[in-house]
Image: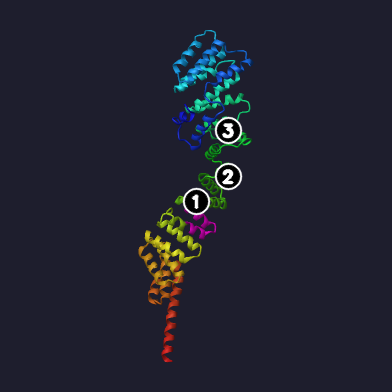
Amino acid sequence: MQYSAFFCRRKRILHAAVASALVVVFAAGPQSLSPVPAVQAQEEETRQVQALRERVFQALATAQERLEEDDYAGARRAIDQVRSIADLNSYERGQVLYFTGLIDYQQENLEAAVRSFEQVVALPDLPTGFMNDTLWTLVQLAMATEQYRKAIQYGNRWLSTAQNPGGDPFYLLAVAHYQIEEYRQSVDFLNRAIEIAERDRGAREEWFALLRAGYFQLEDTRRLREVLEILVTRWPKKEYWTHLSAIYGELNMERKQVAVLETIYDSGLMDRENEIVQLAQLYMQNGGPFKGAKIIEKGMADGIVERNERNYRLLSQAWMMAQDDRRAVPPLVEAARRSGDGQLYLQLAQSYLNLDQYQECAEAARSGLNRGGLRRPDTANVVLGMCLFEMQQYEPAKEAFRAARGDDRSRRTANQWIDFIDKEVARKRDLERQMQRG
């Protein structure tokens, strides 16, 4: 049975980095779950007081052959022959228990396998290599059965005697700590694993991914930023870029946040409406409304950004900030048409006024007043009056200004306009009389 298949039937989707981590470690850990330690132990007995007697060794070799052939009944018979010997020493008892555990493991009787392996490590005077092999087997089984505290217990015991261990054992213990929400211990083990691995070929992506998850849980934003910067440098995936952008935002590093989002956009990886809208808004906030408007327009053209009132309003706002009223009008018309919001019609009227399109200005102002919901109806009447004045519709313009001066905030402006209109009308009347006399 392969470890990946064995574990996949039992894993939980707690965190993507954790789930993939377990499969990788089981497949490439320091020791695999196999009968190899029995043969290796025979070779190192020249340094041990205890030894495997020939009869025991031959029976164990037969058990191993049967096990490799998936003949579990035959393997058990061979083990039972050894078990029947009355004067087995500690090392021989350990080998019997170890092979019993292997047979149970191959038959997917994990609880029985664990019991056998635990009896092995409880025996005294075992060769160090054999003890460590069995401890690591227990670590793997504990992880596979989600007994994370046991995995930590046996893993720490294994590390206490291991000579120059690689990064994998530390990584595996980091996974176990993460699973039981001991995030500080998890990142400590991960940093140790990465430190060891970086001296050689470098740590794997999933190690940094789990470190990212740990610092996120600890709310250690500074460390999280450092890890994400490594991830986007070595494995430039959209997920890491997006997360790094969010972290820059939390740290008020807006220029870097924009730069990261721009990298995602330029790489063609930005395929969600909220991402495109966020980038456009950041441009608008940081002195780049023209870029923001172009990004929204392209998003709409590509079918990513929805053509709704909210997005049309944002597009119009971007063009207004870019001081391009002519381009601001069409999206504002669409936004007003979709929402029926009187306030949008007032904005539209103001844009038409800036463009000297007075007829359209008056129509938009009247639409805003008719629809209601205006924060400042007096302002709408002022704009309406100005547009009507420009069309030389003086009496309707004065009516609009009279309505506007009902609000104290516009009274002075409205009265000035009324006086100005009266003077303009009088001026034109005098001019006409002079022309008639001449």
Q: CA distance from mark 2 to mark 3?
A: 23 Å
Q: In the orientation shown, which residue stands out farthest toward the left?
A: 370
Count neighbours of disc 3 (C-alpha within 10 A) and say few if under 14, some if 14 to 19, many if 20 or more.
many
Does residue 278 belong to the magenta stretch?
yes
Q: Which SS does the magenta portion mostly show?
A: helix
Q: Secondary structure at mark 3?
A: helix
Count neighbours of disc 2 (C-alpha within 10 A) and say few if under 14, some if 14 to 19, many if 20 or more.
few
Mark 3 — residue?
189
The tag earlier along the polypeptide, 1 or 2, is 2
The tag earlier along the polypeptide, 2 or 3, is 3
Does residue 12 belong to the magenta stretch?
no
Q: Amino acid at mark 1?
A: Gly
In the displayed structure, would residue 140 be above or below residue 338?
above
Q: In the orientation shown, which residue stands out farthest toward the top?
A: 86
What residue is shown at x 45% (from left), y 50% (from top)?
272
Q: Secondary structure at mark 1?
A: loop
Q: Amino acid at mark 3?
A: Phe
Stretch in magenta: 276-295
Observer-nearest of 407 and 217: 217
Tell me the number on the disc at residue 268: 1
Q: Position of residue 6 (x, y in %)?
A: 46, 28
Q: Amino acid at mark 2?
A: Thr
Answer whether residue 115 is visible to the viewer in this image.
no
